[in-house]
Image (tube, helix red, strand yellow):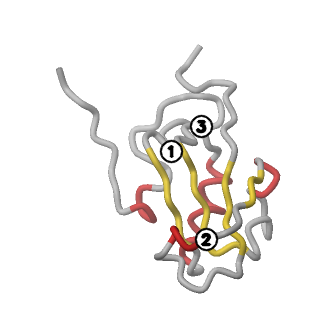
Amino acid sequence: MAHGAGLKMPTFGLPGNIDDKRNLAAIGETVVVGDQALNPGGLAGFRAVVLPNLACMSDAQAHLIAEFVRGGGALIASHETSLYDAAGNKRTNLALAEVLGAEYAPIRP
């Protein structure tokens, strides 16, 4: 089984009533949503999303998240987020590389 295959990590969203998305410590409420939010309009009302090692992600989901960020939403992602496709196949680069401002660079032994 490929790394991350069959795993679905939750997506965390922060409600849209946050005045300063840079000051995450001031957030009093967090809403946990699942994959159902990763559809057109599903992230409406959120100012930020947190993707904690959401390694497996379809191209369509990556596109929706990228559009959310381009529309002014904040994105916090960790570890291998978007490195694998929905079937668990490793990509050559992060699907969210552009909006994260990061590239995948494998560690060479």
Q: Considering the numbered disc 3 on the image, is that residue within a helix, a strand or a loop? A: loop
Q: Earlier in the sequence, mark 3 or mark 1?
A: 3
Q: Earlier in the sequence, mark 2 or mark 1?
A: 2
Q: Earlier in the sequence, mark 3 or mark 2?
A: 2
Q: Residue lying at the far top in this picture: please name it.
A: 1
> According to the image, label 2 marks what residue?
27
**Type of residue at label 2?**
Ile
Question: Disc 3 vs disc 2: which is toward the camera?
Answer: 2
Measured from the top left, where is residue 31 in percent x and y? 75, 60
Query: 27 left or right of 45?
Result: left
Measured from the top left, where is residue 103 in percent x and y? 33, 51
> According to the image, label 1 marks what residue?
81
In which quadrant is the N terminus drawn?
A: top right
Q: How many marks?
A: 3
**Type of residue at label 3?**
Cys
Q: Considering the numbered disc 2 on the image, is that residue within a helix, a strand or a loop? A: loop
Query: 108 left or right of 44?
Result: left
Q: Residue at x 50, y 50 (%)?
A: 95
> According to the image, label 3 marks what residue?
56
Query: 85 left or right of 14?
Result: left
Mark 1 Cα shell of 10 Å, populated few (<14), some (14-19), many (≥20): many
Q: 38 above or below 6?
A: below
Q: Residue at x 69, y 35 (%)?
A: 8
Kindly report the distance in space between the C-alpha atoms of the residues bearing marks 2 and 1: 23 Å
